[in-house]
Image: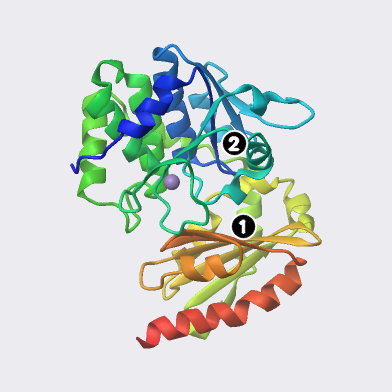
Amino acid sequence: MEKRDWSEILEQIDRHEKILVTTHIHPDGDGLGSEKAIYILLKRLGKEVKIMNPDPLPYEYNFLNNDNIFNHYSESGHPGIIDEYDLTIVLDIGSIIRLGEVGQQMRETSRPIVCIDHHPIRHDSFDYEMVDPHVSSTAILLYDIFQNHFPDFFNLEIAEALYTGILTDTGSFRFKNTDTETMEIATELVRMGIVPGEIYNRIYENRLPEQTKLLGMVLQNINYELDGKIAWFKIDKELLDKAGAKAENIEGFTDFVRGIRGVEVAVKFLENSDQHTRINFRSKGKIVINKLAKQFNGGGHPYAAGAEIFKDMDRAIETLLPELKKCVQEQLDN
Ligand SMILES: [Mn+2]
């Protein structure tokens, strides 16, 4: 493995006693697993640590939370708390916009920020960065710290957290980012004692009935463009209510739709409010979609990205679809 220089970041950790850790809105296994790993490390180093996330912990990641380490930040619930910490470590975020309210507070307190990430499109620069877009997950970077600097601290609990990050960001080792380094590290984690089937079950064989009902409703209303190269669907408040589901219960829907024969890009539109629509892109691997996502206040990885449009859902769809078709067609022509 390539040698990464952690000296600046380790020096910052050394210098500060109260450290805040956070990850992006709609937290995923990579953000959460990486947070847990660094939390344990910082505790072992004798630091006062708090994980403060802009969104609640999705239920399928409860197994990472046996010590109740994940906090859902709100200004009223935690007044002034971000100000109390003298260093912040942000994990897997891509852009500070994706830190929601936590990011806003961080900007106001202007404490030094360490960023550990693997998103290729950068909107912001941070005081200290370890960003490697070539790794399949942020968890791989955390693995590097433990492997090279804290092998004595590297225990099964950390291995499980890191495996969670790798598993979820590679779509269970199916996505294009699954490379030899990913497999080698996964092997090493298995050697340390993690049980892949158990972690998989906790995360993926744990779907709620209402979530399944919602998926069924979504699958009945898929729209196709460009002879089926693009498939898109929308989820509004009404549909969520009908299924009895919540907006956080839609993990994996876009991946499922991408799995349709002939589809190159799947797109989900989610109504957040009558002036805000969230968009999620999944590509099979021919079409790069993060540049388009960037045009619409977003970003992400070449084949998995997100965006947002500050319009109601129908207007957002009208705005995005022509650009999306153009983007897909141009790349297919090349
Ligand atoms: Mn990630």
Image point 38% across, 32% down: which residue?
A: 9
- Mark 1 vs 2, N-terminal side: 2
Circle 1 sits on which residue?
Answer: 216
Amino acid type shown at disc 2:
Pro
Image point 59% across, 44% down: which residue?
A: 26
Image position of 210 (left or right of 22):
right
Quadrant where the image shows the N terminus: top left
Q: In terms of secondary structure, where does tag 1 sit?
A: helix
Image position of 71 (left or right of 3):
right
Location of residue 234 in the rendering, given as x and y in whole percent from the top left corner: 67, 65
Ligand 1 has an atom within 8 Å of the beta carbon of the residue at disc 2 = no
Circle 2 sits on which residue?
Answer: 58
Asked if residue 202 shows in the view, the reply is: no
**Mark 1–mark 2 distance (CA, rounded to whole Å):** 21 Å
Structural crowding at the residue carrying mark 2, measured as other residues with C-alpha within 10 Å and reported as few (<14), some (14–19) or many (≥20): some
Image point 64% across, 69% down: which residue?
A: 221
Q: Is residue 67 above or below residue 286?
A: above
Q: Is residue 112 above or below residue 19?
A: below
**Does the residue at mark 1 contact the one at mark 2 (Cβ under 8 Å)?**
no
Residue nearest the observer in this picture, 249 or 70: 70
Identify the image quadrant of residue 110. top right
Quadrant where the image shows the C terminus: bottom left
Image point 45% across, 68% down: which residue?
A: 260
Location of residue 132 in the rendering, given as x and y in whole percent from the top left corner: 34, 49
Q: In terms of secondary structure, where does tag 2 sit?
A: loop
> Between tags 1 and 2, which lies in front?
2
Residue nearest the observer in this picture, 49 or 312: 49
Structural crowding at the residue carrying mark 1, measured as other residues with C-alpha within 10 Å and reported as few (<14), some (14–19) or many (≥20): few
Amino acid type shown at disc 1:
Gly
Asked if residue 3 shows in the view, the reply is: yes
